[in-house]
Image: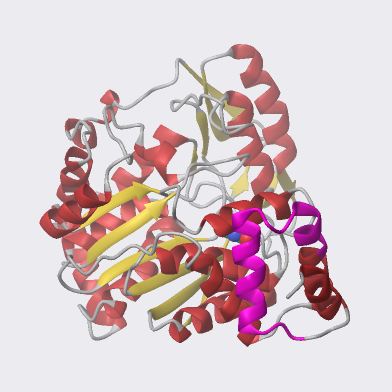
């Protein structure tokens, strides 16, 4: 078999067989197939596409390119959750303790942020001493004992995806449905959970700008997971403006804690309840959406969801007291209000721009080596559809450097569009697929 022939076959609209896809992935990981041939193949796939079977084979070949985590030592149904990412997306921080407090076993792998989107691991490191650099044995022990553990992605998890993603990133071949679906699902399948709940974002701050594409991506991933024998559910949710109010690591942790106390922003709380309901149903812990919602509300009301977060933080070396005393979490020195420049309705808040503002303040990573400032970020006081008067506060900038805060302020004002006409409100959840 020759890679040249496979590139030609795909370029001419052909269908790759399982054997050919394994040959290509194994050869690329072993270094036998060079980057330039794989780049040509990715571009051919980008234009010609892959059918359902090819996408499944590609996913399985990438999942099998490294270690497949064995979670059989954990009793019960293990549930994982994955978000396609966005600005202010602190969902895992509030959702996983809520669901674990209802008796579901959460075994989750998370990543760090890069560019203007944040990562769960960075946010969790706001808790002094907390580490996701635990061994697989500790991971399994924690899930068994307290019902929840989150670890960083191991080097051996789907190494083919790591290589391919880096290649796609520099060859303009990221935004292809089959390539995104197989990339995400290869990691999720290798991470070993029995049930996977996906949060597929759509809007200006998401990979999938249109709802139609988001539904297609969700359907493709659900199909792949089911074909691989996993229980699958996907929620399609809005990312046309930042989720909740807080953007920035420790600020998002504080908002997640407020949500676990029952005081979170409505859009964020509603999304957590929907995803939580899916996770409870996927784990067969709740028989219906209504029952799941009741269970989730009761663990918020009786404090056990917050307690679960503290147990989880402590089990991974963190200071549990920080869950109860917010002032112990990292705090920025400067809190600067941003005022509305005109009177009117907030018509739009460009997600990516708000993410970039946090990056400018030092809250994000420009390169993998950057050291981030966990305390900085933005708290949006007004969101889309709110009416504001000229001079009214619309947001607060949390900063440690006045010069950066000024640049951020200029940019944040550009992110807001204020006009006379009230826009149609977006739903936070557009639909659920299973
Ligand atoms: N996230 C991934 O893990 N892979 C993609 O291709 C896109 C988003």
Above or below, 400 against 9 in this view is above
Residues drawn in magenta: 15-40
- Quick one: quadrant of the N terminus? bottom right
The residue positioned 17% from the left and 42% from the top of the image is: 315
Q: Nearer the viewer, residue 294 or 34?
A: 34
Q: Residue furthest front?
A: 1
Percent x, y of residue 393:
57, 33
The residue positioned 56% from the left and 33% from the top of the image is: 364
User: 9 left or right of 202?
Assistant: right
User: 43 left or right of 258?
Assistant: right
Above or below, 14 against 385 in this view is below
In magenta stretch: residue 434: no
Q: Tell me the quadrant of ligand 1.
A: bottom right
The residue positioned 21% from the left and 30% from the top of the image is: 325
Percent x, y of residue 79:
30, 68
Percent x, y of residue 60:
52, 74
């Amino acid at each position: 078999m020759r890679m040249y022939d496979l590139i030609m076959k795909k370029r001419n609209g052909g269908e790759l067989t399982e054997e050919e896809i394994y040959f290509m992935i194994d050869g690329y990981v072993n270094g036998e197939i060079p980057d330039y041939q794989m780049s040509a193949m990715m571009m051919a796939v980008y234009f010609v596409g892959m059918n359902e079977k090819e996408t499944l084979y590609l996913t399985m070949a990438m999942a099998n390119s490294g270690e497949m985590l064995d979670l059989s030592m954990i009793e019960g149904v293990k549930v994982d959750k994955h978000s396609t990412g966005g600005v202010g997306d602190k969902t895992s921080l509030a959702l996983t303790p809520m669901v674990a407090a209802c008796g579901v076993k959460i075994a989750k792998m998370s990543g760090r942020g890069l560019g203007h989107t944040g990562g769960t691991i960075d946010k969790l490191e706001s808790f002094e001493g907390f580490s996701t650099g635990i061994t697989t044995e500790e991971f399994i022990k924690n899930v068994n004992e307290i019902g929840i553990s989150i670890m960083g992605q191991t080097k051996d998890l789907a190494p083919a995806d790591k290589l391919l993603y880096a290649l796609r990133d520099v060859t303009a071949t990221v935004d292809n449905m089959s390539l995104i679906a197989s990339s995400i699902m290869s990691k999720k399948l290798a991470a070993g959970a029995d049930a996977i709940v996906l949060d597929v974002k759509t809007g200006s701050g998401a990979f999938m700008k249109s709802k139609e594409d988001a539904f297609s991506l969700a359907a493709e991933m659900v199909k792949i997971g089911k074909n691989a024998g996993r229980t699958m559910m996907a929620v399609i949710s809005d990312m046309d403006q930042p989720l909740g109010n807080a953007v920035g690591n420790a600020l998002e942790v504080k908002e997640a804690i407020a949500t676990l106390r029952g005081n979170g922003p409505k859009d964020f709380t509603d999304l957590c309840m929907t995803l939580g309901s899916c996770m409870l149903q996927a784990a067969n812990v709740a028989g219906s959406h209504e029952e799941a919602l009741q269970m989730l509300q009761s663990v918020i009301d009786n404090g056990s969801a917050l307690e679960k977060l503290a147990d989880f933080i402590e089990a991974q070396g963190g200071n549990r007291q920080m869950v109860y005393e917010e002032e112990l979490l990292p705090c920025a020195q400067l809190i600067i209000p941003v005022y509305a420049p005109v009177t009117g309705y907030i018509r739009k808040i460009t997600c990516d721009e708000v993410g970039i503002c946090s990056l400018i303040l030092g809250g994000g990573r420009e390169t993998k080596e950057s050291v981030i400032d966990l305390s900085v970020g933005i708290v949006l006081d007004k969101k889309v559809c709110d009416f504001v008067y000229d001079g009214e506060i619309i947001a607060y900038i949390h900063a440690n450097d006045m010069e950066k805060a000024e640049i951020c302020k200029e940019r944040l004002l550009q992110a807001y569009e204020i006009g006379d006409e009230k826009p149609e409100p977006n739903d936070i959840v557009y639909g659920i697929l299973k």
